[in-house]
Amino acid sequence: MSELRLHLTCRGDSGFTLQLDCALPARGITAVYGPSGSGKSTLLECIAGLRAPEPDSVIRLNGDTWQGQGSPVPPWRRGIGFVFQDARLFPHLDVGQNLDYAMARRSAPGTVTFGQVVAWLELDDLLARATATLSAGQKQRVAIGRALLSAPRLLLLDEPLANLDHAARQQCLRCLQRLSGELQLPMLYVSHDIEEVSQLADHLLLLDRGRLVEQGSLLELCSRLDTRLSHEEQAAAILTASVVQHDAVFDLTRLAVDGHELFVNHLPDQPGQARRVRIPARDVSVCRERPRDSSILNILPVTLSEIEETDSARVLLRLSLGSQFLLARITRKSAVELKLQVGDPIYAQIKSAALLMEATDTA
Amino acid sequence: MSLNHAELEAIYLTVALASITTVLLLILGTPLAWWLSRRRGSIAATVEAIVAMPLILPPTVLGFYLLLMFTPDTALGRLWQQLTGTQLAFSFSALVIGSVVYSLPFVVQPLQSAFQRIPQGLLQAAATLGAPPLDQFRSIVLPLAKRSFVTAASLGFAHTVGEFGVVLMIGGNIPGETRVLSIALFDSVESLRFDEAHRLAAGLVVFSFGLLFLLYRSDRQQGWRVRA
């Protein structure tokens, strides 16, 4: 039984009360997503034991009770790793010594070696540096490495990329993706950046003002019409694609999505690598016939699988593309005039500029 | 210019008193300063005010109450008499107790402000990496507050060397037992031995200046200010 069981009541700092009763899968990356002040950090601090929830709360990982009957297990005996938003490296120790600090206090033997962590997080050139001389991105990579070297059973990350510039954020994201591939380590990743979440997470926990709004598989939640996510302005579907080849002449990358091809801005990934592409619903339009001589590069044959029922000016469509789904937001007037019916074979046009931006930029 | 036997005895006694007092102050002051640095509320404020009292009270007031506590007809005085067979008032031990109380703020305050400067977040990070509280203190707090320990010990030592009023009230002027430098100086002046007084006074001036100079210079090199 590989799960994190939570039954939590905890007063937060900014007036809300976190109230949760759920079980999260203790594998892969679970994103904890929601607006500021929704209790994301409070949740992580409760799990780490850095904040005391109300006495009737329960926190259990794979059958080990951290919080429940009797006195709570203190943070230093929970076997967790915590990556804080502000890194919190020890200023009197250099980078290597910060990593050693964690190695020396391992509770379990652990399989992750010093060398592996240094390689995954690209820390080679930093080991002898004083922590005060590091950039924000370097600090965060050291902090992630330090947390890994304590051989945790669960890694908690509290908006680790929030203070980073674009380049550093991309590098850290790449490192985190590498880690989740290499390690069988469950992670809980707090973020309010949907692009980060789309790139990393397997599972999503959506919080608002201390309450659980949704939880489930990220890809599924993002493509459903009845979730909170789909009603936000930035509603978007996430497609899993693989990199086919780079087109040097036009500076594009060709991806394959369930047998269909998709062109995006040049990506750094190698051919064959899997890649997620987030496609905002507002950038997808539909038509009955495949348009000829269009400037739009990406036109995909899809099947209309669901139409949102609404009285407002715009409606959301769910389009199936092989085993995956796209979202399209169009005016209700267009939907009526096109006489759209569930099951109709139609064509989805993806406004290229927006897609190209989304595929490469997190800004 | 050479020092006579009485002067050497007074120097020895002063150094012994200041050293023992400093060691005791570090042992007692560290946990007290830590407790004060992590607590809010009126209990901590009360303790903080009591610790700071010797800064503003005339030493004679402190000495007077300590003397009353040390006499053999109080509980403390009686207990001391039963345990050691000697009287507490007018003894070296009385001077040590008096000095610890008198110099307490000089050790507790620099430590307390150093502890307060250590971000709670670092200790949380250490806790999540598997460090229990004592380990956190040893591996994070001590190294980060190292300089403040030097400051606290130096100020505690120097202040004990310089005390007079408390010593006079609870120790009197017994050669080899309670006759420390400041008392010896007073004694010399009273009996008009001015050359002896000059030697002692100048010695104390040079010692105090030298110690403070070294302390402040190394603080400047570190870019930190002493908060005593």
Image (cartoon, coloured by chain):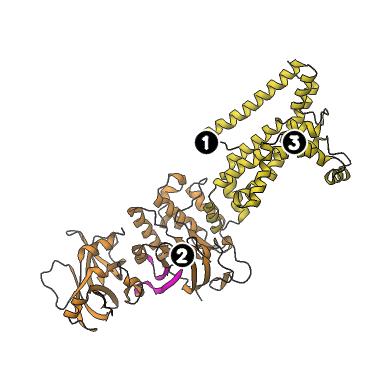
Q: Amino acid at mark 3?
A: Val
Marker disc for residue B222: 1
Q: Main secondary structure of the magenta part?
A: strand
- The orange one among the chains is A
At 59% from the left and 28% from the top, the residue drawn is B213
> Measured from the top left, where is residue B40 in percent x and y?
60, 52
Badges 2 and 1, same chain: no
Q: Give the Cα distance between marks 2 and 1.
A: 41 Å
The quarter of the picture where residue A176 lies is: bottom left
Q: In this rendering, would B52 be left or right of A147?
A: right
Q: Of the residues shown, which amino acid type is indicated by label 1? A: Gln
Residue B61 — which label? Answer: 3
Dot 3, how many residues are within 10 Å of its Cα: few (below 14), some (14-19), or many (20+)? some
Q: Looking at the image, which is closer to me, A200 or A96?
A: A200
Mark toward the start of the polypeptide (3 vs 1):
3
Mark nearer the viewer, 2 or 3: 3
Secondary structure state at the residue bearing disc 3: helix
Res. A271 image quadrant: bottom left
Q: Nearer the viewer, residue A194 or A3?
A: A194
Q: Which chain is yellow?
A: B
Q: Secondary structure at mark 2?
A: loop
Judging by the rendered image, the residue that carries numbered circle 2 is: A39
Q: Which mark is residue A95?
A: none
Between residue A313 and residue A135, name the one nearer to us. A313
**Res A253 seen here:** no
